[in-house]
Amino acid sequence: MSISEVVVPQLSESVSEATLLTWKKQPGEAVSADEILIEVETDKVVLEVPAPASGVLAEIVKPDGSTVTSGELLAKIDTAAQASAAPAKPAAAAQAPAAATEAPAAAPPPAAAPAAGGATGVASPAANKILAEKGMSADGMTGSGRDGRVTKADAMAAQPAVSASPAPAMTASLDGRPEQRVPMSRLRARVAERLLQSQQENAILTTFNEVNMQGVIDLRNRYKDKFEKEHGVKLGFMSFFVKAAVAALKRYPVVNASVDGKDIIYHGYFDIGIAVGSPRGLVVPILRNADQLSIADIEKTIADFGKRAADGKLGIEEMTGGTFSISNGGVFGSMLSTPIINPPQSAILGIHATKERAVVENGQIVIRPMNYLALSYDHRIIDGREAVLSLVAMKEALEDPQRLLLDI
């Protein structure tokens, strides 16, 4: 027997442990080199664990739901064996691991095993999340993906079976009404921890302003077709907000700073976090050196962030750091909000839905496309003056977007 070991990938210094999701192979089954065997969920990303060599999966050391650390042994592959006709059920997976402290958020309470025949019950993290929200499980489902994998589209289209009794995932509360208990994913738990940390450690205030988006809308409408043809990406609005934020941060550096103990760290670079919704929860990938990026560069990077966030493919290093963040609640229809600072940053810009509103210009009531801006800031180092003036600078840049192109 020649054994090749499957181990947990190297996690970043800020991530101490992770949770195993669902094994895609069982002992006795053939595996190919670089074939994905299982996914590992950290508090930031989902990492794929490929087979290091071809052969037969001889043993699963850590079953689904186990808590693991960098380099820990997960399974063994016999590189000299041939797959058996009937794969054996892993003994380790027959019972819950004693060391496991957290199950993946996407996994609902255990359901009946899928019927034999065909590849069923294997789903992507995004699909599992959607199914869990519907009170459903991937068990028994055959998806449209490779080898019958249940995709996000399959999960969105799936409908719960109509039953006179509650679904298996539900349990009865004291008054007899159905409830479902699902553990937080590592990402959701980490988000909760950081939000509480932000509110407890920062002196958060929020200042508001309104911006007439007509200039940006006109500029976008004039060039969006040529822009897409030239750069292969649609011209959105977020790149204008990023450019406006960078322009303001250059004028008021303390808004781009952070607190470290009793020191203020002024950053000579502009790494802008872009809040992106994903099936696993909110993630904030970073636009590095945003001041050096063109409008096209920003749009391409944000589009890539959105796609990979949906697929759980963002890397840990892409969500580490950042000097300022932007959160766009407008994509969900939000009119106004007070965003929470993402530590250790000291400020965050919240943008909202652009709506036609009645405003007064030169003594006349006119209709304009207005967007409410909200800047939450840490009052420990940012005074109201700098906060208000920096938000006014963003407003002025957006209302005269040609200034962004000329850097004035």
Image (cartoon, rainbow, N blue to C red):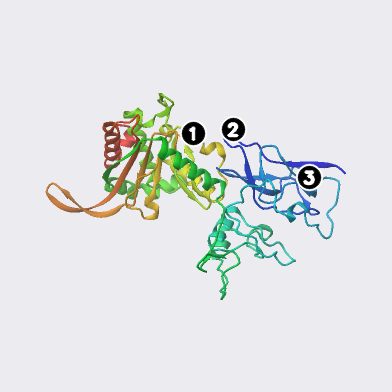
Q: Position of residue 330 (x, y in %)?
A: 37, 51
| Front residue of this view, candidates 37 and 33 | 37
In which image quadrant can residue 127 be found?
bottom right
Amino acid on which the number 1 mark rests in the picture: Gly
Which corner quadrant holds the N terminus? top right
Amino acid on which the number 2 mark rests in the picture: Glu
- Real-space CA distance between mark 1 and mark 3, rounded to the nearest whole angstrom: 36 Å
Q: Give the class, few, some or many, for how many residues have Cα within 10 Å of label 2's Cα (few <14, many ≥20).
A: few
Question: Label 2: which residue?
Answer: 13
- Mark with earlier residue (1, 3): 3
Question: Label 3: which residue?
Answer: 76
In which image quadrant can residue 249 be found?
top left
> Does dot 1 land on a helix, a strand or a loop?
loop
- Mark with earlier residue (1, 2): 2
- The residue lying at 26 percent from left, 45 percent from top is 210
Q: Position of residue 172 (x, y in %)?
A: 55, 66
- Real-space CA distance between mark 2 and mark 3, rounded to the nearest whole angstrom: 26 Å
- The residue lying at 46 percent from left, 34 percent from top is 322
Q: Give the class, few, some or many, for how many residues have Cα within 10 Å of label 3's Cα (few <14, many ≥20).
A: many
Question: Label 1: which residue?
Answer: 321
Q: Residue furthest top?
A: 263
Above or below, comparing residue 127 to residue 406 in the picture: below
Which corner quadrant holds the C terminus? top left
